[in-house]
Image (cartoon, grey):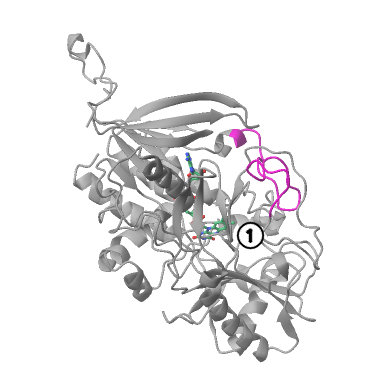
Amino acid sequence: MAAGAGVALGAAAEPALATPAEVRTGPRIAIIGSGYGGAVAARSLAQAGRRVDLIEMGADWEAMASGKGAVFTSMRSPNERSMWFKRRTDMPFSYLGGMDIVNRPIKPGAGVLDVETFAEMKVYVGRGVGGGSLVNGGMAVTPVRSFFEKVLPQVDAEEMYSTYFPRARRNLIVTDPPADIVLNSPWYQFARVSAQQAKRAGYGHRMVPNVYDFDYLRRETFGQVPRSALAAEVMFGNNYGKNSLPKSILREALATGRVNLMPMTEVTRLTQRPDGAFDLSLRRIDFWGSLLEERTATYDRVVLAAGSIGTARLLAKAQHQGTIKHLPPGLGGGWGPNGNVMVARRLWGTPTGAHQSTIPVMGVTNWDDSPQSVFAEIAPFPTGIELYTGVYLAITNNPNHGEFSWDAQTNTLRLNWDRGKAKPGVDAARAFFDRINRASRNTSYRSDVFERHQEFADYFSYHPLGGAVLGEVTDLSGEVKGVPGLFVMDGSLIPGKIGVNPFVTITALAERNMDRLLAGRRF
Ligand code: FAE
């Protein structure tokens, strides 16, 4: 390992002071990406006294917001802040009534939502300090323990369920939706209707915890505060109410004074030097994409927390270009979309509400860990008009995995995933919703909202997982096998699915791994 950087020169000549100024010692540490894995790594290291550079390709929205009010746009009035360098929005609901009227032209800028597009899979991701927490629905779900044990048998489940899941929930500021809101609010008519129809089919429903502040939501209802969840804000960011990472774990990390935040800075290449340290190629741009700076910085420890796609991109490139030797076999494998399948049901004559909160609070489920298992978030469709439609993001137990590799011809990341691989998830979702449709009269699938008139949208995911699986590509704490000093700390560690929305699991695993790595003096 290279020697520690920045040790104050001449410190020995200083007179002995009562409280000596902090001297920077120890390894130079970079964390790439500021989503859930990156936030936990930054806070854990900083609270343990280490200084870190937290490198994030997207904007620092929290800083942009301070004193200026709202920074994010609603889903109905997008602009350059909505999507990452796109000329037109690219929403998961692409059509309405089969017409191309949902997506709008926008100016390209460093907006908060990106779509990573592969041959047969589009993956939605957050861009900015806070990663996916800026654009997600805030559903904070702990996985069913028996399923967690099947997916990650290499992890001590007892420790996770007694220590790390509770800690993750606390640190993320998770609360349960209050009954008065779920049962009475007109903004949740859509959730109640779908839960009742699932019950009629013999399925259960459950309340889903969230990081949204439900007291704030209650005040939104009465017009006492600016509206956010009730103003169609979510996928392009929430201005108020949501405890996204900059308001929870990242706030704690930054409060230590030891985290050097580097927004709008993309790591484009990772190279290991002969002395074991890592050179990171950095590219800093302004909001409009103009290049401000390109440089190389050297670190002794690098934590990859760029999300399943971002981490895979850096590792696959390094493997292909030979800039990191000894990367382990299995790299890029174990990828999955968390079995995501989206479906919209037309409930002829049953209103779901013209005005819908963007924050989901309920799910319907038959989950028993079998291949037919479905946990479906009852998703809002906040168009502002009554559409008599129930929308769901189904999470299925699809056994198939995809793999990442580097395409030398196009110099891009490739994902081996196709509709054949998605099929078991679609079959499970269809069987689940067919039964609900049979139990409720006058319902049918909508084929006029997704691409290619699909009834079951199997071509996009909000929940990319895998690519550097814990215990396979990394050791049991997240350090890459054969490459000491290189760590993975994000959704890449989870092999393809987890049975529920994933960020609580990503956070809890990162908490566990950081504890183990700090105890093992890996930093
Ligand atoms: P992530 O949060 O994606 O953070 C990675 C960060 O790294 C991002 O900020 C990137 O900009 C940055 N980055 C990437 N490459 C580079 C690079 N080369 N250099 C510098 N920075 C880089 O990773 N999950 C739930 O549990 N509940 C929900 O309700 C939910 N709803 C969702 C709704 C939407 C629309 C979307 C898109 C996702 C949703 N998710 C939800 C998924 C969740 O946000 C996702 O699993 C986590 O954000 C993944 O966390 P990671 O730490 O893996």
Determine the secondary structure under disc 1. helix
Quadrant in which residue 278 is drawn: top left
Query: Who's the residue at 46% across and 30% down the image?
Result: 282
Q: In this rendering, is residue 67 above or below 92?
A: above
Give the magenta part as a residue range: 64-90
Q: Image point 22% across, 26% down: which residue? A: 3
* Quadrant position of the N terminus in the picture: top left
Closer to the camera, 143 or 415?
A: 415
Q: Amino acid at mark 1?
A: Arg
Q: Quadrant of the C terminus?
A: top left
Can residue 336 be seen here? The reply is: yes
- Could you say where residue 26 lies in the image, as x and y percent from the top left? 24, 30
| Position of residue 504 measured from the top left corner of the image (x, y, whole percent) | 43, 59
Answer above or below: position of 344 versus 459: below
Q: Picture coordinates of residue 45 (x, y %)?
A: 31, 40
Q: Is 135 situated above or below 179? A: above
Indicate left or right for 120 with 508 as reference.
right
Q: Is residue 350 magenta?
A: no
**Residue 259 visible, this orientation:** no
Frontmost residue, 200 versus 228: 200
Is residue 228 or residue 471 the one in the foreground? 471
Q: Most prominent secondary structure in the magenta stretch?
A: loop
What residue lies at 46% left-to-right and 80% top-to-bottom?
367
Compared to residue 27, the image places residue 486 above or below, namely below
- Mark 1 residue's CB less than 8 Å from ligand 1: no
Residue 52 image position (x, y, % from top left): 35, 33
Disc 1 residue crowd, few under 14, some 14–19, many 20+, Cα 10 Å? some
**Residue picked out by circle 1:** 218
